Amino acid sequence: MEIPQILQFVDESVYTQTGKHLNDLQGKIVRGILNRQKYADVAETYGYSEKHVKKVSHELLQMLSDVFGEQVKKSNLESVLERQINVNITLGNKNTRNNNTVSIASINICPVPSSVSSDETQTETIDKLRKFGLSDEQIAEALNLSLSLEDLKQNMI
């Protein structure tokens, strides 16, 4: 994925969680970190003081930690974003501001042919969702299952 698409993902993730888009400097900081620039280089390139870039960066990384639910630092931003881009798949249109996920792909579940049992289809769907990297809790929520997590695990063995 190229940096412009990554920046768009970050901006959409922040907007989904906070209702605010990244400002210009925040976007430039993300771009600089992904290009392995030092804060001094980012500051010089874009005409800011190094102190200001460090301050905004600290606030940005804290905000991204809140948005993604894991600690984000300059040293791990790239791996966090890679993980988040690969994991944050929502089903249907369940995106809300208070939801930590961002829709980067949709999965349409079509009606089940009468020759296939719904339990069999649901088992296949759960297996596919696990391959996408969703946790059992996320799968249960996405499929509106009222089973406990332990029941879900037992039913799928």
Image (tube, rainbow, N blue to C red):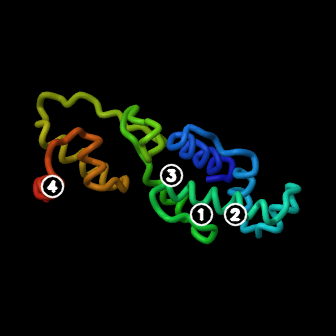
Identity of the amino acid at label 1? Glu
**In the displayed structure, does residue 32 sit left or right of residue 136?**
right
Q: Callout 2: 10 Å neighbours few (<14), some, many (20+)?
A: many
> Could you give the CA–CA distance between mark 2 and mark 3, rounded to whole angstroms?
18 Å
Q: Callout 3: 10 Å neighbours few (<14), some, many (20+)?
A: many
The label number, if any, that marks residue 67 in the structure image: 3
Residue displayed at 88% across by 62% down: 44
Circle 4 sits in a helix, a strand or a loop, which is it? loop
Q: Name the residue under label 1.
A: 78
Q: Mark 2 points at which residue?
A: 33
> Could you give the CA–CA distance between mark 4 and mark 1, rounded to whole angstroms?
34 Å
Residue displayed at 69% across by 63% down: 33
The image quadrant of residue 149 is bottom left
Q: Is residue 21 above or below residue 60?
A: above
> Could you give the CA–CA distance between mark 4 and mark 2, rounded to whole angstroms?
42 Å
Q: Name the residue under label 4.
A: 156
Identity of the amino acid at label 4? Met
Residue displayed at 61% across by 45% down: 11
Tag 4 and tag 1, C-beta contact below 8 Å: no
Query: Percent from the top left, x then y, of residue 86?
Result: 47, 54
Q: Is residue 123 above or below residue 29?
A: above
Mark 2 or mark 3, which has the lower sequence index?
A: 2
> Could you give the CA–CA distance between mark 1 and mark 2, rounded to whole angstroms?
8 Å
